[in-house]
Image (cartoon, grey):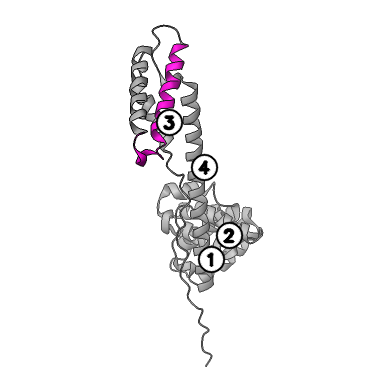
Amino acid sequence: MTTPRRTARRPLAPRVAAPREPVDPARIGRRVVRRRAKGMDAGAIAAALEEARFDAQQASRHEDLADDVRGPAELTEWERLAQLLADAAPGTVYDPDVDDVAQAELAADAAAAVRQAELREAAWIAARADELQALRELGTLEQADPRDGDEAVRDELTRRAGGYVQADVDAWLAHALAAHLGHYRDPAAREAAAGLLPPPVLAHAALLAELAHLTPGTDVDQLAFAARLATTEPEAAGDLATFLARARSSAI
């Protein structure tokens, strides 16, 4: 009797966190000044500037505040706002919504937030791709349920393989989509899959779903021909699934 070969089990890759942008005390200080200054006229801002100068003078006497950057940033911002209103028409009050400097900083912050979100998503995709690769090596991929975002992970695995179609991953996703497994239990996820997965995978899933109605209880391994048909003739596989669906509706 042949002893089955055992594959060494290795831990799945942890989810990697993208580096976070460090806290900027100077930026926080500027925002605090702008919030406080909103609606102030030139006189009120001048008074606030004098107060900030006094606070800066007091802070300069303390060695433990030598490395403080927020205080000087607040003082500089009060000075800028004072000059801004000095150059404006009499009676003008400060409005951060029309402050070009403030708006430019907000735009930069928004762009940085988008970049951070992209980095977090890329890190998750890479970690999830490592996880699915480990499951493939263990021969247990078919036992896992797909998660939201695995369509992008499929693309990452294909990229890593040099553009080669990952037949086992495609079959896994098609079966999960047909059987409504994992995040595909949600109709919205199934609908979104139509724009995220390539035609062969969608045709395979549709054909599997109809064959499951035609022959309930059939093991997915017995339907391997559906994957071959969907891969070589995705349009024909889709047409066959549509035909079977219509036949089933007519029989009801």
Identify the element where label 2 is drawn.
helix
Report how far apart the C-alphas of labels 4 and 3 lie in the structure: 25 Å
Disc 4 marks which amino acid? Arg
Q: Residues within 10 Å of mark 2 (few under 14, many from 20)?
A: many
Residue in view at x 43 percent, y 19 percent: 81
Q: CA distance from mark 1 to mark 2?
A: 8 Å
Q: Residue furthest top?
A: 90
Q: Nearer the viewer, mark 4 or mark 1?
A: 4
Q: Main secondary structure of the magenta part?
A: helix
Q: Is disc 3 in contact with disc 2, using a CB cutoff of under 8 Å? A: no
In the rendered structure, are the residues bearing label 1 and label 2 in contact, judged by CB atoms less than 8 Å apart?
A: yes
Q: CA distance from mark 4 to mark 1?
A: 27 Å
Q: Of callouts 3 and 2, which one flags the residue occurring earlier in the amino acid sequence? A: 3
The span picked out in magenta is 61-87
In this view of the protein, which residue sits in the foreground, 31 or 175? Answer: 31
What kind of residue is marked 1? Gln
Question: Disc 4 or disc 2, which is closer to the eye?
Answer: 4
Residue at image position (47%, 40%) is 113
Earlier residue among tags 1 and 2: 1
Q: Left or right: where does residue 181 sit relative to residue 167?
A: left
Q: Position of residue 93 (x, y in %)?
A: 38, 13
Q: Name the residue that disc number 3 marks.
A: 73
Towards the viewer: 183 or 87: 87
Secondary structure, mark 3, is helix
Element type where label 4 sits in the image:
helix
Which residue is denoted by mark 1 in the rendering?
A: 133
Task: Identify residue for label 4.
Answer: 115
Q: Position of residue 150 (x, y in %)?
A: 50, 55
